[in-house]
Amino acid sequence: MTPDTASVRLPKTGSDTIDPAGMRVIWLLLVAAFVAILNETTMAIAIPALNATLGIPPELGQWLTSAFMLTMAVVIPTTGFLLQRFTTRQVFLSAISTFVLGTLICLVAPGFSMLLVGRVVQAAGTGIMMPLLMTTVMNVVPAHSRGRMMGRVGLVISLAPALGPTLSGVVLDTLGWRWLFGIILPIAVVALLLGAKWMTNLGETTHAPIDVLSIVLSALAFGGIVFGLSQFGGHGGSAASAATPGIVIGLGAVFLALFVWRQLALQKKNDALLDLRVFVSRNYVLSVVIMTIVALAMFGTFSLLPLYLQNVAGLDPTAAGLVLLPGSVLMGVLGPLMGRIYDARGPKTLLVPGTILIAAAMFVYSTVGTHTPMWFLMCVQIVMSLGLASSFTPLFSASLGSLERSLYSHGSAALNTLQQVGGAVGTAVLISIYSSALHSGEAEGLSTADAGAPGAHAAFFTAACIALVPVALSFFIKKPEESEGAVHAGH
């Protein structure tokens, strides 16, 4: 262990206090996560404007979102290893520096290709932030207070989406798309400077070698699956055009099986890139499954909704952002309250009604049309945001709380990996359904609004049906015991 590796001591089992220096690290990570998520959510509203400005079709423009999530899905599996191999300070400064570089590339990008490169670089930094934040919370915060602290995490991941779409709409209508990155860049630089001055280290490091083969297999697995899914519907949905995506998805599944096999072999020596022993805990597995499906429905809906609001409902970018604002603000405000309810009452009190609200909101979205009033769309979004606020805190807390401390970083990596893969798959599938109907309708001479409405309805209905699965599973989530000892398979 290097001299500066353990500047902050982790709390002992049963401790009721949070180290002040550990809290400072958490607040620094919350700031960085806020910046990263704000950047991610500004893009959803911007996609239609970028499609028009850069002259690209919707299924290509959506890769500015899908490639971002896909890159994070490739990066995040490595964080379980990175958080054990390198110090907290090293990981944080590397991540925020990468994010700053990616934002700068996006700002000066001359066209779509370079903009896509910048988004990938941004994602490489962003992908490390949430696992680092969640692992730090689990290590620093006593078990009985984790719900409240995860509520603050929920506040950050909700407040940023509240500001992102509205900020994006205003910027697009007044300054142009480059300023989306011009505004984010100085905030990211400030976060970098604060981290350079105040970031300290937590825990101890190991010296296990990184397994390059695991990284390659991970990239090919997740990349193949999501890329293949994104191609369905991109060329009108013909049978001929569906053959190649099916092959790509099949190859991705093969590489995923090889990745799992490789990790099972390496974890016997504690050298796994992603330790799969986290999946021994039933409570963790159920929580992760629910989170993945919620992410699939949520990110897919949030990617499709701006296209629907602008192309079908006829709203301008600012108005589309305002539709999303009230619900997202409510979601952020309720985060700490949901954490306190979780600490006092456990997960089912929040998770069961929360998943029901998510599914119900998406069923309603599948019925709205070109003449649906803006206030009604706001109300539906508020209902969905309330459901999301009721779901995130218990899922984060119950999943990682079901693991041994030595597996926190790997558990966080697996949770965030599957969340991002679910989001990327949801985005790819729903946009593909929408694009297929849009192309078919326009080929028949329909307007964009008339051609896009059936596709949007079908996509929202698909997401709503998928969202019924978390409703059923939410009844089986339990609150982990507050001790930090070993977790058995039945927990």
Image (cartoon, rainbow, N blue to C red):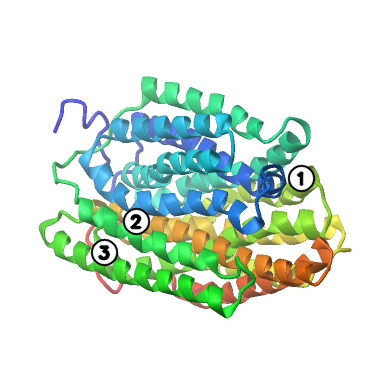
Residue at 76% across, 51% down: 323
Task: Out of 378 and 392, give the one closest to the viewer.
Answer: 378
Q: Secondary structure at mark 3?
A: helix
- Which residue corresponds to mark 3? 259
Q: x, y (%) of residue 34?
A: 53, 38
In the rendered image, residue 147, in percent from the top left (x then y), is placed at: 46, 52
Q: Dividing the image into 4 quarters, which one contains the C terminus?
A: bottom left
Three-letter code for the amino acid on which mark 2 is drawn:
Ala
How far is disc 2 from disc 1 in space, using C-alphas?
A: 34 Å
Disc 1 secondary structure class = helix
Q: Which secondary structure, mark 2?
A: helix
Residue 24, image x, y percentages: 40, 30
Residue at point 55% right, 24% down?
186
Q: Amino acid at mark 3?
A: Phe
Q: Is 222 rendered above or below residue 174?
A: below
State which tag comes first along the sequence, 3 or 1: 3
Looking at the image, residue 51 sits to the left or right of residue 446; the answer is left
Q: Earlier in the sequence, mark 2 or mark 1?
A: 2
CB atoms at circles 2 and 1 under 8 Å apart? no
Per the rendering, the mark at residue 317 is 1
**Front disc: 2 or 1:** 2
Task: Name the outermost residue toward the left.
Answer: 269
Label 2 Cα neighbours within 10 Å, binned few <14 / some 14-19 / many ≥20: many
Residue 219 marker: 2
